[in-house]
Amino acid sequence: MKTTSLLSAATYAYLATVASAVGPAVPENAERLPGKPDLMPNWPWRNPFADANNTRITISSEPEASAPTRFVPTCSSQRTFRATEYLLDDLQELPPLGLISWVEALRKTFTNRPYPGSWDGVDPHGYDRNMLMMEYMDVPLTVRRWIEEEEWSAAGKTKGKGLFAVLAKADVEKGEKVVATATSLREKKPETEEEEKEWREGDVNRVVIFAPGAVYENAPLWVAEGSECEETLSDMTKYTAKPTDGAVVAYPIDKTSANRAEGKREMEFTIKAQVLKVDDSVSEEDEQQQEKGEKAGQFKTQVEKVEEFKTQVEEVVDKVKTAVKDEL
């Protein structure tokens, strides 16, 4: 159900381009602006797992490199997460189809912030820019702590990067409106074990709203927990957009879209991360030669077997001839 109140243009500033702090016109006042998707400028992330059948990652360490550097994973981790997906239009809709209950808090968090992008560095523009919402408890603890650290460490300055808005849940039936993020209501992070416990107990009553592009900033943390390389994947100093020896690479390798035609907002996304090392085994050229050699060897073996079989047949024939002569 769409509310009758209108939202100011400032509400959409988060979803505007860096060059413009004013978002598209309010849907009820003007025609819906169609999106004109294009790539985000200076988007650093690319999918290192584009070829699902290739266990190696190949990349040139330098543009002028004569031969590419090849990497193999020493550890991999992958997880799928559930979220609800919204477009800019949905800022005026009541939950569960919209985000009107959190509009004021979103405005305070995202105003004058550049849009982090959608999946794969695409900016849909206009009303087609999307946001995701998740139950805060469904977000891995390492990611929750990263989000909170970003906000609390910048308290009194810029209030963090503004990539994720941690918000209290709203009672829609009572008409509750959330006007500030949960992290902004606390000046600093919990310092004692008791404060940490008290804060974490509140996670069940929180949600987090973010653009898909925000995930790329801390992607390894989403799959670190419980993995065989949890410590390495949790070390954000090792996370890089460009594979190097000992580095961590991560990427959302799959996602679904909400079935808006049926009034649904549910979707899923899958993140994969790997710890890399230089592949110092055979080079690609040597590997090809090795494969040719193996095939040649296999062919040679088959030929040898045929020759061996022919020899056995000839021996049998000779024995038969000798037996026949003796009988005669």
Image: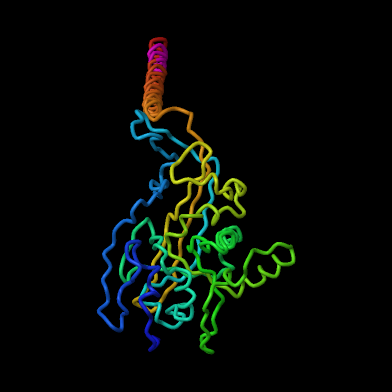
The residue closer to the viewer here, 172 or 47, is 172
- The percent position of residue 125, horizontal first and vertical second, equals 31, 66
- The percent position of residue 282, horizontal first and vertical second, equals 44, 27
The residue closer to the viewer here, 12 or 49, is 12
The residue closer to the viewer here, 45 or 279, is 45
On screen, 187 above or below 64?
Answer: below
Which quadrant holds the N terminus? bottom left
Residue lying furthest front: 156
Residue 324 on the magenta span: no
- The percent position of residue 80, horizontal first and vertical second, equals 50, 60
Q: Residue sitting at 46 percent across and 60 percent down?
A: 214
Q: Residue sitting at 40 percent across and 20 percent down?
A: 304
* Most common secondary structure along the magenta stretch: helix
Q: Residue sitting at 53 percent across and 85 percent down?
A: 176
Q: Which residues are magenta?
A: 315-323
Q: Which coloring applies here?
A: rainbow
Q: Quadrant of residue 189?
A: bottom right
